[in-house]
Image: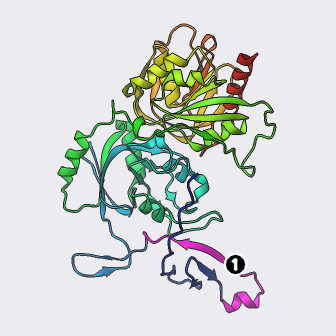
Amino acid sequence: MAAPPATAPAASRCLSGAKSCWAAERSSSSFAVSAPSTDLRQSRSRILSVRAKVATGVQRASTVDDGAKRPWKLSDARLVLEDGSVWRAKSFGASGTQVGEVVFNTSLTGYQEILTDPSYAGQFVLMTNPHIGNTGVNPDDEESNQCFLGGLIIRNLSICTSNWRCKETLEEYLTKRNIMGIYDVDTRAITRRLREDGSLIGVLSTDQSQTDNELLEMAKKWKIVGVDLISGVTCDAPYEWLDKTDSEWEFKRDQSSETFHVVAYDFGIKHNILRRLASYGCKITVVPANWPASEVLNLKPNGVLFSNGPGDPAAVPYAVKTVQEIIGKVPVFGICMGHQLIGQALGGKTFKMKFGHHGGNHPVCDLRSGRVDISAQNHNYAVDPESLPEGAEVTHVNLNDNSCAGLQYAKMKLVSLQYHPESSPGPHDSDTAFGEFIELMKSNRL
């Protein structure tokens, strides 16, 4: 696991408000807020002490054309969408110019897991929750060893962080990882546009030398459909994964006593998928996306996992071929991109959705039992159930749009889900899917 990043020095200025009786006492890493009011002391009320880390980006002063210095930051960034709309904003994190596909995420929490989810490669993530950054960043919530998304778009950037696990602010984190972010932009209006028109290519820029029209041309020329994004996020060589879900976060107490060897194809796999498999008693070997199927079968695994990943499944025919060579020989579990690749390997088709599913509040129905789970999802493509062969059964549907959310093919010993059962972030309703994979491997072992 990667070592925790060093904590950057905190801001030197304190927070104060007009008509406020609170005074800020600064230190090298935090500020303490106390209430020195005589009335409060006389009443013997408890004095609340709050320790928090100041987020510097929202407080930086700006100088305008008239030479006057303002105590607040002014708009210095633009988001230009391919439909010609231009959105003025304030920047935080890295500076420069970046192109990507704009998608919106409806999760209320978990922005750090979203930032480090490899499935967001090539995309700008717009958070519909307006207040972001208040819990800061910590090394325990990483879903991969780096950020793969192109940029972060938010409404309000928290002026401070207050969380017992916080090690640095969101701005410090993005700056170190060279990721652009913008705030103080109308995320509600942009979300409505994306829902009506579909996902749009956009350009984020802090470069004032480029005109709006130049940035618009960049957006119109850039393409994400048909591009192999998996090769940019997969691991370079096979490795063993050992870490389980930490005991303080573990919610499944009846752990399996059996051990299963699972080979996991890394199409952009998240750490918590691996942790959940390990917690269910699996010994895990992770292999790159282009690893030969014959090499995997030579390891004689009890099962194979095809992981989540970014982009268009039709752009990675080598991965589809690998899936075709493995299914039917050992039990298989597909998640997100893995689900789509299984659909294509069975002879089915995938298609690009209007604006995809991104968030931790998607209702999914298990058609076999009628059970409804609230799921975490992140995908722009889906399997066309009408194109699947006889024997392939649709087991789950998304109740928002009735799209295919799960497959089962008993003869081929496979199950797959379009969403993320590890739910990091998100509710834990779907964790039972890992148990279903375990049962599939058990029955195949008999």
Q: Residue at x 67, y 78 (%)?
A: 49
Comparing 279 with 131, the one in front is 279
Name the side, left or right, on which 173 lies relative to 439.
Answer: left
Q: Secondary structure at mark 1?
A: loop
- Residue 146 shows in the view: yes
Q: Quadrant of residue 362?
A: top right
Q: Residue at x 60, y 64 (%)?
A: 166
Q: Name the kind of residue labelled 1 in the image.
A: Leu
Q: Position of residue 169 (x, y in %)?
A: 51, 65
Q: Position of residue 328 (x, y in %)?
A: 58, 14
The residue pinned by badge 1 equals 48
Q: Position of residue 160 (x, y in %)?
A: 53, 69
Among all residues in the image, which is located at the extreme top? 390
What residue range appears in magenta?
A: 36-58
Q: Position of residue 19 (x, y in %)?
A: 53, 84
Reply yes or no: does residue 41 show up in magenta: yes
